[in-house]
Amino acid sequence: MKENIQLAPYTTLGIGGPARFFVRVESEDELLAAFSFAETRQVPIFILGGGSNLLVADEGFPGLVIYVALKGASWSNEGSDVIVTANAGEDWDNLVRQCVERDLAGVECLSGIPGSVGGTPVQNVGAYGQEVSETIVSVRAFDRHTGRFVELSAAECQFSYRASIFNTTARDRYVVTAVTYSLRPHGEPAIRYPDLKNFFSNVSTTPSLRLTREAVRSIRARKAMLITPGDPDCRSAGSFFKNPVVSAEMFACVEEIARANNLIGADERARSFPANDGAVKIPAAWLIERAGFQKGFQKGRAGISSRHTLALVNRGGATAREVMDLAREIQQRVLERFGIALTPEPVFVGFDPR
């Protein structure tokens, strides 16, 4: 158990003050001991994984930060599928690499996403047309209400777009310790997303899982969404806003506003993707750019990535307050222009973003 440990080095944004207490746990027994410590001291708890989707307050966190470092993965056959169970502290992209090397389909489009396995079910991590909910069988977690470890089925996790019970109805109740996935041996890659389709537009045969993984990582690197040491555009929390899902009627209003303001041509369509139940998903980056923000925009020491409008970056020495000031300005401008409220994607630690 350590005291007053700076949290900035544990996040990809490189922002955050000290944790009053900090402990690294490598087993479920150590996790229980950490909870016992916090209960004795009567301090709040925050569970830290890969730190890739966090904005930590400049003042830090006044309680105990538990850094989950449970390692290891197991592989077994079940019928025609391969079952992979990985502990929460495993590096996510490394697990994806192992799956692809074993020619197992189901997570190839999620290559290059920073963070740990334990974070994947929380936000139903997804990218390039694929989500972890498509392959998750169950999640093992510590239930803080009952003090027991439980196995939650995929149905019990209630996955939806960037959401699950872990970040909605049961927020702060469960601590994920392991995730089990079901993958397809020798399956075809999920080439659904426009960026991937364009990447392989001149390829006549179905690309392999390995080539798909390389393509995804290449696309992410081009957008500074692949962690590259020394690249200031990579000092981010990934996509800062969720892509809003709206009704078809609301999307028609957005298009009308865009045409009226000469943001698209008379016969041009606003960028969109079909969502469930006839709804429409609008890329948040498209809304941000047409609200007047361009790649490379800077406000103090915070800014927008020069390669991806959705990534808010730390240009060097930025504070959480500076990042939030920029985020609120973007939200306000998009709301004023299109009537759409952008929802932040990161987890906020030590402060209420409202």
Image (tube, rainbow, N blue to C red):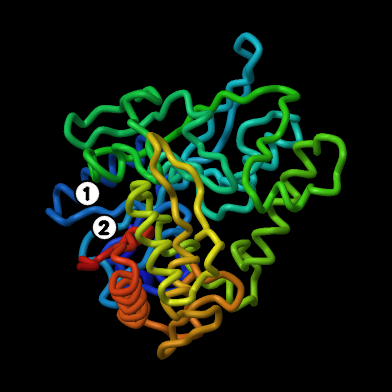
Which residue sits at x=32%, y=40%? 175
Q: Is residue 245 above or below residue 221?
A: above
Using the image, tell me which numbered label, if any, was put on residue 37. Answer: 1
Q: Which corner quadrant holds the C terminus?
A: bottom left
Which residue sits at x=35%, y=35%? 29
Residue tagged 2: 64
Residue type beneath disc 2: Leu
Residue type beneath disc 1: Phe
Foreground residue, 105 or 3? Answer: 105
Foreground residue, 131 or 333? Answer: 333
Q: Is residue 351 left or right of residue 254?
A: left
Q: Can residue 10 be seen from the camera position used here?
A: no
Residue 206: x and y, percent? Answer: 81, 35
Which residue sits at x=57%, y=70%? 308
**Element marked by disc 2:** strand
Q: Is residue 344 left or right of residue 212?
A: left
Q: Which corner quadrant holds the N terminus?
A: bottom left
Q: Can residue 263 be seen from the camera position used here?
A: yes
Q: Is residue 25 left or right of residue 331?
A: right
Which residue sits at x=45%, y=69%? 259
Residue 344: x and y, percent? Answer: 34, 61
Tell me where residue 255 sits by quadrant: bottom left
Q: Earlier in the sequence, mark 2 or mark 1?
A: 1
Residue farthest to the front, as pictured: 266
Residue 37: x and y, percent? Answer: 22, 49
Q: Is residue 274 above or below residue 43?
A: above
Characterize the local packing of mark 1: few (<14), some (14-19) or many (20 or more) Cα atoms within 10 angstroms.
some
Characterize the local packing of mark 2: few (<14), some (14-19) or many (20 or more) Cα atoms within 10 angstroms.
many
Residue 302: x and y, percent? Answer: 43, 83
Contact? badges 2 and 1 (CB < 8 Å): yes
Q: Is residue 101 above or below residue 80?
A: below
